[in-house]
């Protein structure tokens, strides 16, 4: 029973240390640059995806 309590305490201590280390080592940017506007070609058609396939009949669905 005492070993289980010690392992729980070690786990909690490890989680606390990992959390503190992640906050301490996180790099905070001093300023945020505005994202660049996307460049689109005025003449380019919009890209589309066409999916072609046949539907299964009820018998084919039942066979699966």
Image (cartoon, rainbow, N blue to C red):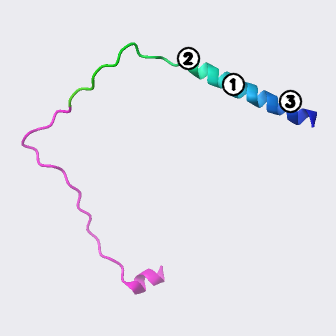
**Tally of numbered tags:** 3
Residue drawn at 46 percent across, 83 percent down: 62
Q: Secondary structure at mark 2?
A: helix
Secondary structure found at label 3: helix
- Distance, label 2 to label 3, CA atoms, is 28 Å
Report the Cα–Cα distance between label 1 and label 3: 15 Å
Q: Which residues are magenta?
A: 38-64
When asked about the image quadrant of residue 13, the answer is: top right
First of labels 1, 2 by sequence position:
1
Q: Say which residue label 3 marks.
A: 6
What residue did someone put label 1 on? 16
| Real-space Cα separation, disc 1 to disc 2, in angstroms | 14 Å
Q: Is residue 21 left or right of residue 31?
A: right
Q: Secondary structure at mark 1?
A: helix
For the residue carrying disc 1, how many other residues have a C-alpha within 10 Å: few (<14), some (14-19), or many (20+)? few
Other residues around mark 3 within 10 Å, as few (<14) / some (14–19) / many (≥20): few
> Percent from the top left, x then y, of residue 10?
79, 28
Q: Is residue 54 above or below residue 8?
A: below
Residue ID for mark 2: 25
Crowd rating for badge 2 (residues with CA inside 10 Å; few <14, some 14–19, many 20+): few
Per the image, is 40 magenta? yes
Indicate yes or no whether the magenta region holds residue 47.
yes
x then y, percent, for residue 26: 52, 19
Q: Is residue 10 left or right of residue 40?
A: right
* Above or below, comparing residue 54 to residue 21 in the picture: below
Residue found at x 23% / y 57%: 49
- Which of the two discs, 1 and 3, labels the residue nearer the N terminus? 3
* Vertical position of residue 15 compared to residue 57: above or below: above
| Of the image marks 2 and 3, the number of the one nearer the N terminus | 3
Q: Residue furthest top?
A: 30
Front residue (pair 55, 28): 28
Q: Residue 55 appears at what percent x and percent y?
A: 32, 77
């Amino acid at each position: 029973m005492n070993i289980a309590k010690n392992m729980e305490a070690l786990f909690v201590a490890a989680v606390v240390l990992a959390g503190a280390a992640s906050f301490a080592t996180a790099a905070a940017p001093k300023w945020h640059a505005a994202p660049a506007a996307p460049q689109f070609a005025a003449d380019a058609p919009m890209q589309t995806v066409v999916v072609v396939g046949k539907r299964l009949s009820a018998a084919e669905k039942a066979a699966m």
